[in-house]
């Protein structure tokens, strides 16, 4: 299952894929999905839609609905955690508890010697992925710009054809 991919990569001393980490935790998965859809997918579809003169507005609305749903799911999980903490009489904010749990895990990993290695791998992989993402986004922007330029050129050519056709009709009369 995809949730176990990260841990399997760490076990095998393969550079782990950071965005697979903790996907079995709803809070993490919902937040990741929300952010990916909000900051990658949604802007991309808006550009596509603009390029196509609002020709795929239904698709854009669907993407916007997806973003809203992921945000709603994420907020529900946070609210559930707040209620759970109140019931248990805890006064610490939700994130403090998560940080404490992560610190305990890091201490346990440090004892076994895996934590430092994993952190180095995580940082290198994070940097590599950020570079790749930036390059991919730049490439996508170039593709979109080229498509826009081609569309504009096509419109100009069609306008010229219409004008020439109109001139020919006027000459016949």
Image: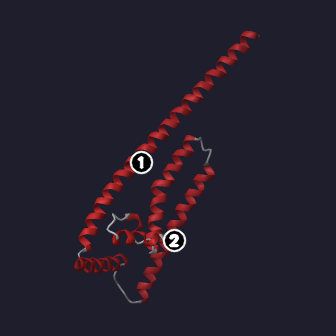
For mark 2, what is the residue? 73
Of all residues shown, which one is farthest toward the front? 12
Of all residues shown, which one is farthest toward the bottom? 88
Q: Nearer the viewer, residue 153 or 53?
A: 153
For mark 1, what is the residue? 136
| Whole-percent x, y for residue 63 in the image | 56, 57
Q: Nearer the viewer, residue 125 or 57?
A: 125
- 48 relative position to 122: left or right: right
Residue drawn at x 37%, y 78% as measured from the top left: 94
Mark 2 Cα-neighbour bin, 10 Å: few <14, some 14–19, many ≥20: some
Mark 1 Cα-neighbour bin, 10 Å: few <14, some 14–19, many ≥20: few
| Whole-percent x, y for residue 98 in the image | 35, 77
Tell me if residue 49 comes above or below residue 130 in the rendering.
above
Q: Are circles 1 and 2 on residues that touch, CB within 8 Å?
A: no
Residue drawn at x 69%, y 18% as measured from the top left: 165
Tell me if residue 100 comes above or below residue 89 in the rendering.
above
- 8 relative position to 71: left or right: left
Tell me if residue 164 comes above or below residue 131 in the rendering.
above
SS at badge 1: helix
Of mark 1 and mark 2, the one earlier in the sequence is 2
| Whole-percent x, y for residue 145 in the image | 47, 38
Residue drawn at x 39%, y 71% as measured from the top left: 8
Inter-mark Cα distance, 1 to 2: 29 Å
Residue 173 bears which disc, if any? none
Which quarter of the figure is the C terminus placed in? Answer: top right
SS at badge 2: helix
| Whole-percent x, y for residue 128 in the image | 32, 55
How is the model colour-coded? secondary structure
Quarter location, residue 162: top right
Q: Nearer the viewer, residue 56 or 107?
A: 107
Quarter location, residue 159: top right
């Amino acid at each position: 299952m995809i949730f176990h991919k990260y841990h399997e990569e760490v076990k095998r001393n393969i550079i782990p894929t950071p965005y697979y980490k903790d996907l079995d935790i709803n809070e993490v998965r919902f937040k990741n999905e929300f952010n990916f859809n909000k900051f990658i997918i949604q802007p991309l579809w808006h550009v596509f839609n603009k390029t196509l003169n609002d020709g795929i507005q239904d698709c854009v609305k669907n993407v916007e609905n997806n973003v809203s749903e992921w945000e709603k799911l994420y907020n529900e999980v946070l609210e559930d955690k707040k209620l759970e903490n109140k019931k248990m009489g805890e006064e610490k904010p939700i994130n403090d508890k998560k940080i404490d749990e992560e610190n305990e895990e890091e201490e346990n990993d440090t004892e076994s010697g895996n934590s430092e290695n994993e952190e180095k791998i995580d940082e290198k992989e994070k940097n590599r992925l950020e570079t790749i993402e930036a390059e991919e986004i730049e490439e996508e922007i170039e593709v979109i710009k080229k498509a826009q330029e081609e569309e504009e050129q096509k419109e100009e050519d069609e306008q010229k054809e219409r004008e020439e056709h109109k001139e020919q009709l006027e000459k016949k009369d």
